[in-house]
Image (spheres, helix red, strand yellow):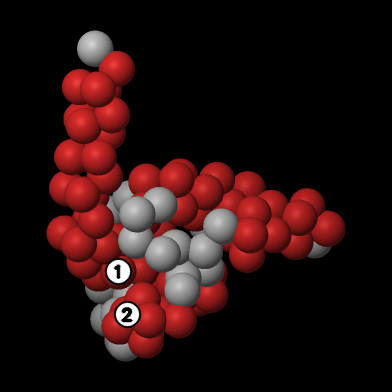
Amino acid sequence: MANSLSLRSILDAKKLTGSNFIDWFRNIKIVLKQEKKAYVLGGPILEEPSDNATNEEKKAYRVYMDDFNQATCVMLASMGLDLQKQHEVMNALDIILNLRKMFDKESHIGRFNILRELF
């Protein structure tokens, strides 16, 4: 657990404010990978198993949802207050999609402008 806390401190020190989206997202992936929860960002949300599903399938779904909810909480906790309020009703995948719409283009433009000035 000590490793988990030390890596999460990266997120406390570098909360998402907007312009740092790419760095923040990289740090989120690092923390979730270390905690073995990064897989929840890799695709659509699992569907709840039917009533006649096996106990193993139901358990796997519960573990997935626990990991998914924890990833969402880690993301929200590492945002500035305004962004946190804006995303508090979303899940991890919706948060990422929304943040990409908001900031990814900005960061690409900023990077382009810096490279243009350098050359």
State the residue position of label 2: 87
> Where does residue 107 sit, x and y in percent of width and height?
26, 45
* C-alpha gap between disc 1 and disc 2: 6 Å
> Where does residue 43 sit, x and y in percent of width and height?
27, 54
> Where does residue 14 sit, x and y in percent of width and height?
56, 57
Q: Residue at x 35, y 54 (%)?
A: 19
- Quarter of the picture containing the N terminus is bottom right
Q: Which mark is residue 95?
A: 1
Q: Which residue occupies the foreground of this view, 2 or 57?
A: 2
Mark earlier in primary sequence (1, 2): 2
Q: Which residue occupies the foreground of this view, 31 or 64?
A: 31
Secondary-structure class at tag 1: helix
Q: Which mark is residue 25?
A: none
Residue lying at the far right in this picture: please name it. 2
Q: Which residue occupies the foreground of this view, 48 or 1?
A: 1
Work out whether 109 lies above or below 116. below
- Apparent side of residue 11 relative to residue 25 in the rendered image (left or right): right
State whether residue 31 appears in this view.
yes
Disc 2 residue type (three-letter): His
Q: Residue at x 24, y 12 (%)?
A: 119
Instruction: Tell me where residue 94 sits by quadrant.
Output: bottom left
Residue lying at the far top in this picture: please name it. 119
State whether residue 97 appears in this view.
no
Q: Residue at x 36, y 68 (%)?
A: 92
Disc 1 residue type (three-letter): Ile
Please state the total of marks drawn on the protein image: 2
Q: Which residue occupies the foreground of this view, 116 or 77?
A: 116
Work out whether 34 lies above or below 91. above
- Mark 1 in CB contact with mark 2 (< 8 angstroms): yes
